[in-house]
Each structure stands twice: as structure tokens, then as C-alpha cells.
């Protein structure tokens, strides 16, 4: 048994932590690779570079906010099973405002030039919606609102935990925590007040998330093929973004739990539950994907079938289609059915990494054929992977730095720890006579 098994405050003993030098170096090299790839792409293959950015933005922004939405959802439904995951989910949520800044840079360097509706006349009913100024405005305002609401939630969570931790750390409390705990009114009062603050803002976050991620799917992905549309596509994206967040959360906690000293809290039962949720969204991804395909196949309408035929019948996209289906559906379906594999850290880590690769390739498979229909897949894939390495480095650096400086567990959350009303019934070991 872990020496921390009965002491929820044990992880505080290592605060503030140092991010391992190897992690910092790897993150720095990865970010340099991403910047170099972006620079090379803009200089030599401008449209492909923009397409690669869109693929990466949709994947990484989806994972960042999707993981954070698990913490929001658990707050809304008063869930207890995954409370130990909340700080990690909040670390992902901290990345979304940074992603919004990168999207603004994309707009400023002329990224919208990759969209066909910028260069051709659109039908009146689409021309009103697909105008550069209107698109940029709704993206920045809507996603900006989502970022602000998310930061309000994260600040309330950190204030309660930092204040609680400061009572135990004493002189070892980091000085900058005072910016969050100024005017501290005592653990009991603050715990209740900050929980209610999170509970009040959570419904707004859910609503804005569902609306803006649906709009984002239409504006940034679907409008790359402005004459194609599918009613289920926006919902498919925002649900798969949440799914990618679950996967990212599993990977992050599995690789960092020893460093943060939280193995006692992230038990096999937590990963079993997280694995079941991941499996459920695997099924939902497969269902909604096939439902879209079936509706388009049955309708056989000219403005709809071109998008699907290009990606499922024309090489090299056809081969990539089978890879995506295998990694996003067949692999998780066949492995996550097992109760045991979800509880084995190394096995669950391998499965979630494969799913993450599959979702990354799915974003590329959706976006890039609209940018380049040619048979060459090597150049756009290389640009997308290179930028993806840069995003991975950025996520690693920001999230690791954040987790090294704050309490790794939500100590002040009223649902952290075992439920006092739980009754465990164990079969009698005696034989009836």
C-alpha cells in the first residue's frame, strides 16, 4: 500500500515541484520543431501550412477544452468517482485561451485565404454568413467568452485548494498564491463559496461549449468545402472533442502521477471508470460517423456525395480512412471491452495513445482533402505532424509548469474522497449450516 494512501495532504509535501530538466528540454525542442515546420510551410506551401494549422487547432483545442469539460460535468452532476482528475482537467482548460491566441495569429497572417469562399461568389444565403469579418468576430467573441468562463471556474477551484493547502504548508506556501487567496475567510466558508461559484458558472460553460464548438466545426472545417454540408457534423465534432479530452486526460495522468505523488488517488477503479466513459464515446463516434455516411449515401445528392467519395474512394485518402476507422473504433472497441486492460496502467496508456493518434489523423483526413485533392499525402502529412509536435511541446511545457506549482488534487472539493454514506457489503466467509 502507498504510504500516502490515508493522507490526502501528502502530495503537498513536494510543493513547489521542479519540472524535470529532460521534460523542459524535450518540450523546448518540440516547440522549435513546430515553429520551424510552420515557417517552412508558410514559405513553400502556404495553403498546406494553413490546412495543417487548421487540422492541429481542431485537434488540440478540442482536446484542451474537452478534457476541461469533464471537470465541469462532474461539478454539475456532483460526481465523486473522478474528482482526483479535476486538477489535470483544469490544466488542459488553461490551454484553451492560448489556443485562441494562436487562432488570432492564424487570422492575422492571412489564414482565411485557404477557404474557397474567399475567392468565389457564394449563394446569397451563404454569402451573408461566410464573410471574413463576421467569421473572425464570432470566433473571437464566442471562444473568448468560453475562455473567460473557463478561467473563472479554474480560479475558483484554485482559490479554495490553495487556501486549504496554505493552512498546512505554513511558511512553505508559495508567495504568489496570495494573489488567489487574498481576503481568505477560512476553509469552511471558502470551500462552500467557491464550490457554489463553480456550480453557478458550469451550466454557462456547457452551453457556450456546445454552441461554439458546433460553430467552430462549421466555420473552420465544413466551410473548407462550402458547397457541402451535413447536419450531424457539428455535433459529431464537439462530441469527439470531448472524447479526445478523455483520452488526453488518461495519457496525462498516467505519465505524471508518480512525479506528482498522486498514485494513491488515481486508483485502478478511477481508470476503469474513465475507460468505460472513453469506450462509450468510442461507440458514439462510430454511431454518429456512420449515421452521417448513411444519410449521405441514401440521399445520393450531388452537393453531398463529393466530400465523402473523395475521402473514402480516392487514394491516398481511402487508405487513411481505414487507418482512422481502425484506430478510432476497432482498436478501442476490442480492447476497452476488457475490464482488466482498463485497470492496467501500461495497457490503458498504450490504448489511449493509439486512440489519440487516430483522432489526430481523423482531423487531418477531414481537413486536408479540401485543401489539396492531389495524390501527394507526404508533404501535407509531414507539415501537419511537424506542427503537431510543436503543439505537443507547448501543451507539455504549460501543463507541466502549472501542475508543478499548484496542489495536484482538489483538496477543498466537497466530493473529493470516499463517500461517507457508502456501504460496502462483503460476502460472508462463513458457510451456512
Image (cartoon, rainbow, N blue to C red):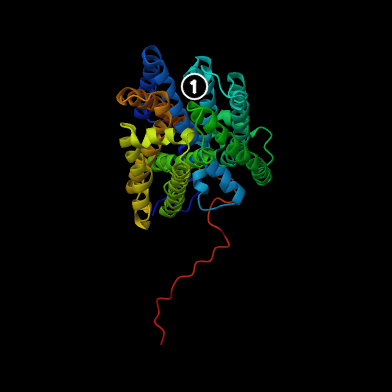
- Residue at 53%, 15% in the rendered image: 108
- Residue 275, visible in the rendered structure: yes
> Which picture quadrant has residue 138?
top right
- Residue 94, visible in the rendered structure: no
Q: State the count of labels.
A: 1
Instruction: Work out which quarter of the rendered image holds the N terminus and state it.
Output: bottom left
Image coords of residue 120 (percent x, y): 52, 18
284 or 428, nearer to the observer: 284
- Looking at this view, name the residue that lies furthest to the bottom: 433
- Residue at 54%, 41% in the rendered image: 69
186 or 93, nearer to the observer: 93
Image coords of residue 89 (percent x, y): 51, 40
Callout 1: 10 Å neighbours few (<14), some, many (20+)?
Answer: many
- Residue at 33%, 36% in the rendered image: 318
275 or 328, nearer to the observer: 328
Image coords of residue 80 (percent x, y): 54, 53
Where 212 sits versus 329, above or below? above
Where 160 sits versus 271, above or below? above
Q: Is residue 89 left or right of residue 412?
A: left
Instruction: Work out which quarter of the rendered image holds the C terminus and state it.
Output: bottom left
- Looking at this view, name the residue that lies furthest to the top: 43
- Residue at 52%, 36% in the rendered image: 65
187 or 140, nearer to the observer: 140
Image coords of residue 262 (percent x, y): 44, 45
- Residue at mark 1: 115
Q: Is residue 48 left or right of residue 90?
A: left
Q: Which type of secondary structure does the marked residue at label 1 adopt?
A: loop
Amino acid at each position: 500500500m502507498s504510504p500516502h494512501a490515508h493522507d490526502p495532504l501528502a502530495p503537498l509535501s513536494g510543493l513547489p515541484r521542479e519540472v524535470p530538466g529532460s521534460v523542459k528540454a524535450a518540450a523546448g525542442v518540440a516547440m522549435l520543431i513546430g515553429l520551424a515546420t510552420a515557417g517552412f510551410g508558410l514559405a513553400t506551401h502556404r495553403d498546406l501550412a494553413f490546412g495543417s494549422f487548421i487540422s492541429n487547432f481542431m485537434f488540440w483545442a478540442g482536446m484542451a477544452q474537452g478534457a476541461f469539460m469533464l471537470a465541469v460535468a462532474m461539478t454539475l452532476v456532483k460526481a465523486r468517482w473522478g474528482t482526483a482528475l479535476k486538477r489535470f482537467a483544469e490544466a488542459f482548460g488553461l490551454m484553451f485561451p492560448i489556443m485562441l491566441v494562436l487562432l488570432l495569429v492564424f487570422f492575422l497572417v492571412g489564414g482565411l485565404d485557404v477557404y474557397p469562399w474567399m475567392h468565389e461568389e457564394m449563394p446569397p444565403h451563404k454569402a451573408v454568413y461566410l464573410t471574413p469579418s463576421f467569421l473572425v468576430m464570432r470566433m473571437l467573441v464566442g471562444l473568448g467568452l468560453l475562455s473567460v468562463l473557463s478561467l473563472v471556474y479554474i480560479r475558483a477551484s484554485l482559490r479554495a485548494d490553495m487556501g486549504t493547502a496554505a493552512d498546512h504548508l505554513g511558511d512553505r506556501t508559495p508567495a504568489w498564491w496570495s494573489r488567489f487567496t487574498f481576503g481568505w475567510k477560512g476553509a469552511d466558508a471558502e470551500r462552500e463559496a467557491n464550490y457554489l461559484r463553480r456550480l453557478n458558472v458550469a451550466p454557462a460553460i456547457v452551453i457556450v461549449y456546445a454552441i461554439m464548438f458546433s460553430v467552430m466545426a462549421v466555420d473552420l472545417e465544413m466551410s473548407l468545402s462550402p458547397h457541402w454540408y451535413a447536419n450531424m457534423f457539428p455535433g459529431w465534432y464537439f462530441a469527439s472533442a470531448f472524447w479526445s479530452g478523455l483520452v488526453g486526460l488518461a495519457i496525462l495522468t498516467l505519465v505524471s502521477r508518480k512525479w506528482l505523488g498522486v498514485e494513491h488517488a488515481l486508483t485502478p477503479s478511477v481508470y476503469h471508470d474513465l475507460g468505460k466513459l472513453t469506450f462509450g464515446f468510442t461507440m458514439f463516434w462510430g454511431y454518429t460517423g456512420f449515421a452521417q455516411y448513411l444519410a449521405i449515401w441514401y440521399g445520393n445528392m450531388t452537393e453531398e456525395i463529393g466530400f465523402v467519395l473523395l475521402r473514402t474512394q480516392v487514394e491516398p485518402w481511402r487508405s487513411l480512412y481505414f487507418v482512422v476507422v481502425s484506430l478510432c473504433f476497432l482498436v478501442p472497441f476490442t480492447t476497452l471491452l476488457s475490464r482488466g486492460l482498463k485497470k492496467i496502467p501500461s495497457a490503458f496508456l498504450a490504448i489511449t495513445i493509439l486512440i489519440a493518434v487516430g483522432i489526430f489523423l481523423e482531423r487531418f483526413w477531414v481537413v486536408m482533402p479540401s485543401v489539396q485533392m492531389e495524390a501527394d499525402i507526404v508533404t501535407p502529412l509531414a507539415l501537419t505532424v511537424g506542427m503537431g509536435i510543436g503543439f505537443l511541446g507547448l501543451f507539455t511545457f504549460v501543463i507541466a509548469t502549472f501542475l508543478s506549482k499548484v496542489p495536484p488534487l482538489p483538496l477543498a472539493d466537497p466530493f473529493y474522497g470516499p463517500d461517507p454514506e457508502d456501504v460496502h457489503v462483503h460476502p460472508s466467509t462463513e458457510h451456512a449450516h
